[in-house]
């Protein structure tokens, strides 16, 4: 295969059928009016970027609720909380029975979780929240899986970028002016590159993000060193209960 043919194939995988792609409306007028066909495309990769406090997470949660209300997908939507900084109940809320919340123990495992969710083909929307910046090969693979399963893959990034390449649509969330009004700017794939005021009055806000925390280790099998009965400060092992075979 020639280099030109390979570049064309990569561009096809990344872009997909943009003009005919089905969309998921966000139910936020400012965003839907700035996007072609009034929503984010299914079967493609979308980036939403912005610092905390700009309405980024609240807007994504509104998109999730809109997707669930529309009855899209076999099992609704999935949210991968890479940094483990959001309350799962705050994400799911009204869609507990149709929303999957995945919290990997390591942020680096978040793209792998999104890979599995996309391959299942059971979701209309998969949100990958605050994962490390995706290298281009991984972004292309996820974009390809999204296209194969007709899933809208949304990357939420709180830095300057969420991927090294592969996004069809990119929105930038920010606060502008003396009153720090939330705005959204379509940087790629939108109808215009101008900031639009983002009215979130009708959107249910999420709880503030928590500090990332590691898993609580299981210390039931090992007693602390220096416990009574452990000679010379050695660690005493506690016998594990045995369960009968079933």
Image (spheres, helix red, strand yellow):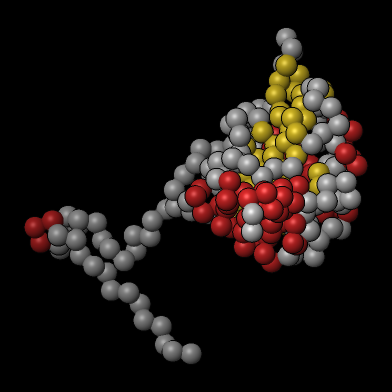
Percent position (x, y) of residue 185? 76, 27
Percent position (x, y) of residue 153? 71, 50
Q: Look at the image and tell me whether residue 130 can be seen.
A: no
- Pick the quarter of the image with the N terminus: bottom right
Residue located at (15% from left, 63% from top): 229
The answer to which quarter of the image holds residue 129 is top right
Q: Nearer the viewer, residue 75 or 233?
A: 75
Residue located at (31% from left, 66% from top): 221
Residue located at (80% from left, 65% from top): 74
Asked if residue 113 lies left or right of residue 18, the reply is left
- Seen in the picture, residue 188 relative to 106 is either above or below; the reply is above
- Seen in the picture, residue 36 relative to 75 is either above or below; the reply is above
Residue lying at the far top of the rendered structure: 178
Percent position (x, y) of residue 228? 17, 59
- Seen in the picture, residue 235 relative to 155 is either above or below; the reply is below
Asked if residue 138 lies left or right of residue 193, the reply is left
Residue lying at the far front of the rendered structure: 2
Percent position (x, y) of residue 99? 72, 57
Q: Look at the image and tell me whether residue 200 can be seen.
A: yes
Residue lying at the far bottom of the rendered structure: 246
Q: Tag count in the figure? A: 0
The answer to which quarter of the image holds residue 172 is top right
Residue located at (73% from left, 16% from top): 176
């Amino acid at each position: 295969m020639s280099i030109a043919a390979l570049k064309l194939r990569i561009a096809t995988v990344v872009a997909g059928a943009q003009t005919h792609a089905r969309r998921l409306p966000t139910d936020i007028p400012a965003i839907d009016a700035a996007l072609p066909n009034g929503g984010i495309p299914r079967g493609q990769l979308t980036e939403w970027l912005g610092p905390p406090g700009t309405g980024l997470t609240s807007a994504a949660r509104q998109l999730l609720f809109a997707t669930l209300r529309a009855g899209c997908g076999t099992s609704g939507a999935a949210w991968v909380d890479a940094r483990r900084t959001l309350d799962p109940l705050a994400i799911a809320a009204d869609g507990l029975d149709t929303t999957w919340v995945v919290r990997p123990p390591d942020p680096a495992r978040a793209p792998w979780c999104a890979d599995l969710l996309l391959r299942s083909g059971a979701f209309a929307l998969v949100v990958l929240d605050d994962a490390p910046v995706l290298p281009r090969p991984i972004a292309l693979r996820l974009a390809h899986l999204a296209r194969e399963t007709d899933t809208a893959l949304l990357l939420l990034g709180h830095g300057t970028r969420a991927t090294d390449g592969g996004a069809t649509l990119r929105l930038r969330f920010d606060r502008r002016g003396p009153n720090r009004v939330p705005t959204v700017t379509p940087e790629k794939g939108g109808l215009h590159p101008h900031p639009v005021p983002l009215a979130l009055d009708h959107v249910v806000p999420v709880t503030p993000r928590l500090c990332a925390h590691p898993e609580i280790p299981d210390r039931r099998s090992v007693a602390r060193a220096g416990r009574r009965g452990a000679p010379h400060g050695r660690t005493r092992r506690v016998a594990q209960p045995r369960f009968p075979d079933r």
